[in-house]
Image (tube, helix red, strand yellow):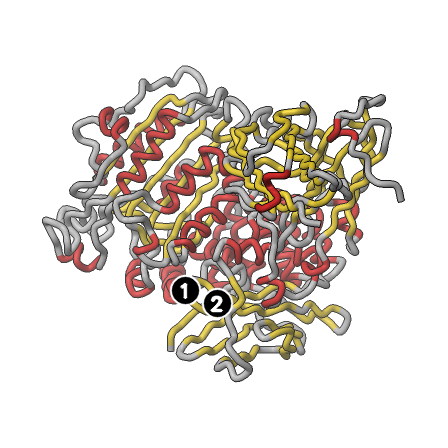
Amino acid sequence: MESIVPEKLDAPGTHVLVIGVSAYPHFEDGPHPTRWGELLGMAQLSSAARSASEFAAWMLKAYNNPKAPLSSLRVLLSPSAGEQMNPEIAALLPDDCAATSRNVLRALREFRRCCQPHKENVAVVHVVGHGVQLSKSGSIVLLTDCGSDEHMTVLGGAMDMASIHAAFNHADTAQNQFWFVDACRQRPSVARRFEAMQAGLKLDEPNGAAGSNAIFYAATTGEPAFARVNGISLFTESLLAGLNGAIAAAPERPFCAKWHVSTLELAKKLPTMVQALAAAERAGQTIDTAGRLANVVLHEYPRSPDVALTVAISPEAEAERCVGSLRHGQRGLIRQDVTEWPMQQTVEAGIYEVLVKLPEREPVSLMDLANPPVSQWQVEVST
Amino acid sequence: MSPPSLGFLVGEPETHKTGRLHVSVHSDSQFFLSNVPIEIRDSDLMLVERVTGSKELELPVGLYQVSAVLNDGVASSKLVRVLGGKKAEVELSTMSAHNRPVDSNDLYRSVESNLTLGGTRKGLPVGPSDRTSASSPMEARARAGAARPFEVDNDDFPITIDATDGKLRRLSRTSWVFEPQAEAKRVPIARVRHKNLLVTCSLPASRESAHSVNTCEIHLVDSPCGLRVRGWISPERTVARALQNMLDSGEFAPAAAMAKDGAEALQYKYSDPTGAALGSLILNKFGHLGDRKEWLENLARGFSWLPDAKVLLALAILQAGGDSARALDLAIHASRTTLLYTEVFSLLLDMLRRWPDDLRSDERIAALGDLGELSPFLDWNSICLSRVVEE
């Protein structure tokens, strides 16, 4: 399974494997149902492959890690009928990119080969599809040929993510790893049947440990929470929002001199973001963080992230009498004599202060953080 | 008292280019006073310095953020103005509410949002040169819709609760204190019945001797899936409670820093084995379990009623490539009793699923089967093992 970007192995780089499965032809509602497929009791998905393609597109276009630039990107997608892929990724995909167990095994082998040459390599794995989460640190993800009569067991066409993660948990491979597994947690009646079953796709597990290999499992309590129909999954949506600035961490020399996304920021903020998004959909979603959490940088922002800052006056009726100014905490004046409220200003992330003057009143100030991507402040001017 | 200077705001000429900033933490716990890392960031939010305890720094004039993760488990921060030639003082402390048991009023109290996706802040008249933003983990989770207090409509709410090996004292309509009554022989459990739902929850409490009583709290929370129960370490157990709060809010780095120094003290000095096991669990997240093997041996031997210690020891043995027969013995033994922590259950399940050899495979598979019967009904969001069954 070839990389969709030119593979570079002569220097440390980031190697990415993305798998998204929406189409399950052997399920009861698929075009080629089987007894095993019916036994699984699951239905086609509408957004898993698209979600994976959007993540791959972000890696392709936005990912920035000067110490380990993008050096290979393998993408396997099995979209359902009519599911739209990210067009830039779709244009680069090879003919046979279906997320079958055969293709996934080949891609894993190639991915493992790419990760090995340099310990400074970064490995990123993103998998979306039906799953059966068995614990906080292990799940089975079903591939598109799951349920096929060609397999020896009902889970022959499934990946044991804990085993595959463990196969990369040793000292002779990329020491900086990020794993994202975005799969449904099935209802107890379904999950119960698979507790003692072994998934078909596993790898040898060498001894030792990688430096950092956090794995983030998204698990929903029911399929409606998995994704907006024909949209992208809630987990991937949160992850992309986070990578685009919402989980940016401030610079911290010598760890990272620029704004960045790191293991621990992901572990801290991603669950809250996903839960908030799921709650808005009146659904429950948990994020389980497993693996070794040594803090490493995934993504560096080339410059401080922009913040869309809005400053409103309360009560609104007083706004027309207010004159304001905005200052950065150290660099000083950004805007002055502001009379149009709410004030809207794109600023770099940081600490700012607003001063509002009203005739015959003491000035009112507000100092606060402008956090990416959006900050909304309200200056209370009533006495 | 003289009014605060507005020099920075109104462009008053600064005769000094630097000023002084004194930072400190207010806490009842000596451990917190001397061990909590405090971060000072400049107006670009670049880390200027990380200190522990109280410290005075000379800094360029400007606005700074001072923050620390305190015993409520979330980052508490203040913004401060450093004026030329003057000294600014910042003391970080948890709001008093965070050391009280969580009840409905606390949870529904209006809290300024500090969510990553942006929040609304209200301005203050010029006055104090700093502001605080802090919230408890449960408040943060409530904002995220993850855990709200369970709604109790009236005093005749159809709910029953009991617990093994101890007595319950009501704190609010949705929370109780659990006091262990007898010397520990097993992990105590709370049972909550509501309509056709039975929720059981392991409790992080123990009575080791007449002088060592570790109480805990039980909270009913609402989730998108309905009633859930949370076992929570009591506020008096400052370090252990902080570890649980930090774990809950995803503040893993400060939790690990605290566990490194504090977990051993929990075991020996304060005889808090459930807190010590939680500390070990956190250390495992950072791959430091192997460093504590001898200490885990003592925990497993000294508190044989706590199966979590056996699981963690088995894991440490396996990670070190040690005696797998002994590790398996510990794991199988632990699988026969009720565990305290959900994550330990998960570690045990995965360890047994992927055991590195074929030793006693029948027993291992049987143990796996027993755990597998339980796992679909677990509340994976709960730090303490909690099972939800519709009767």
Mark 2, residues whose alpha carbon is within 10 Å: few (<14), some, or many (≥20)? Answer: many
Q: Amino acid at mark 2?
A: Arg
- Regarding residue B328, the answer to whether it shows in the image is no
- Quarter of the N terminus of chain B within the rendering: top right
**Both labels 2 and 1 in a single chain:** yes
Q: Nearer the viewer, residue A235 or A293?
A: A235
Q: Amino acid at mark 1?
A: Cys
The residue shown at (58%, 52%) is B247
Disc number placed over residue A35 in the picture, else none: none
Q: Is residue B215 above or below residue B355?
A: below
Q: Is residue A46 above or below residue A195?
A: above
The residue shown at (62%, 63%) is B106
Q: Which residue is mark 1?
A: B225
Helix, strand or loop for disc 2: strand
Residue B342: x percent and y percent?
50, 59
Disc number placed over residue B228 in the picture, else none: 2
